[in-house]
Image (spheres, rainbow, N blue to C red):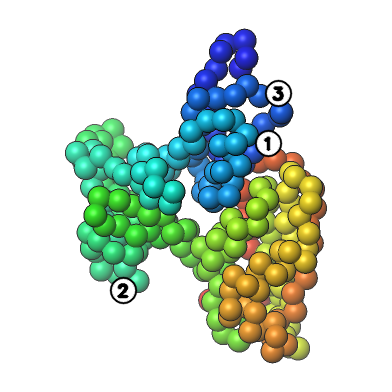
Amino acid sequence: MATLGTTVMVTTSSLAYLMPPETPRMRLVVLLGERCPAPLRRALQDRFGAEVRSIYAASEAIIGPDLDEGVEAYAWNRDRLHLEILDAEGRVHDQGQGELLVTRRMGEATPLIRYRLGDWVELGSGRLRLLGRIGHAFTLASGVKVTRRRLEEILDGLGHPIAEARFRIEHRPAGDLLQVHLQSPVRGLRPEAVEAALLDGDLDLADAVASGHVRLQVRCDHGTARAKRRLVVEEYPWSL
């Protein structure tokens, strides 16, 4: 990079965080492929002395760049893409919160008509805010459903890059056993801090643990860096 005089780097936030100290200072760092929480963005700005921007990109479509407002909000080209949301009742709207639907106006080779990306977003006023991935993660013994989006939000707030997060819940007669195993390429992630973040970040989980319905075990290990965080959920027996 130094030999080529590189001034712009396009990568994921996890890999940018793990670049070695001798990496040259940049003019611009463009992040895509995963969310970049505000504390990590500030750390990357200080690390590279660069402007840090994000692009909302998926395999099916590149939505557009962030609005540089200090929040995870993105713009899109209305001549190229038509965006809508699908609400929880299955109705389509052009504003509000719901699952993102993408229609590509000019895509004869690979046309997309109301393609569901699996992202829960807030759409309106010329801006798109990514709220997280949709979908069921696991169900607690108390009957509460925990979503993948909630788990991602908690992981984002840990202040450490997480290469892999594995949640295994076993439904037992005496109550649930929830085992959380996190791997980070950076040392210093403590199980107590992760447990506190889980309980602070999900009141239903905290209530289930406090009432004895769920027993929580957390393990943190040093792991190999990944280009994108891997989240694995195992539930036995599976429940919805």
- What residue do we see at 25% from left, 36% from top? 107
Residue behind mark 1: 18
Q: Nearer the viewer, mark 2 or mark 3?
A: 3
Residue 218 found in image quarter: bottom right
Residue 165 in the figure: left or right of residue 73: right
Evaluate if marks 2 and 1 touch, with contact meaning CB atoms under 8 Å apart.
no
**Residue 153 coordinates in the image, percent (x, y):** 55, 61
First in residue order: circle 2 vs circle 3: 3
Residue 194 x/y as whole percent:
71, 64
Residue drawn at (55%, 25%) of the image: 26
Which residue is labeled 2 in the image? 89
Q: Of 232 and 121, which appears nearest the observer?
A: 121
Residue 82 at least partly seen: yes
How many residues crowd around disc 3 within 10 Å: few (fewer than 14), some, or many (20 or more)? few
Q: Nearer the viewer, residue 51 or 11?
A: 51
Mark 3: which amino acid?
Glu
Residue at mark 2 to residue at mark 3: CA–CA distance: 52 Å
Q: Nearer the viewer, residue 225 or 186?
A: 186
Q: Secondary structure at mark 2?
A: loop
Task: Identify which residue is drawn at 56% across, 43% down.
Answer: 42
In three-dimensional space, the C-alpha distance between marks 2 and 1, rounded to whole angstroms, equals 42 Å
In terms of secondary structure, where does tag 3 sit?
loop
Q: Residue furthest top?
A: 3
Comes first in the chain, label 2 or label 1 = 1
**Which of the 4 image quarters holds residue 200?**
bottom right
Disc 3: which residue: 22
Q: Quadrant of residue 88?
A: bottom left
Instruction: Name the disc covering residue 128, or none.
Output: none
Towards the viewer: 220 or 44: 44
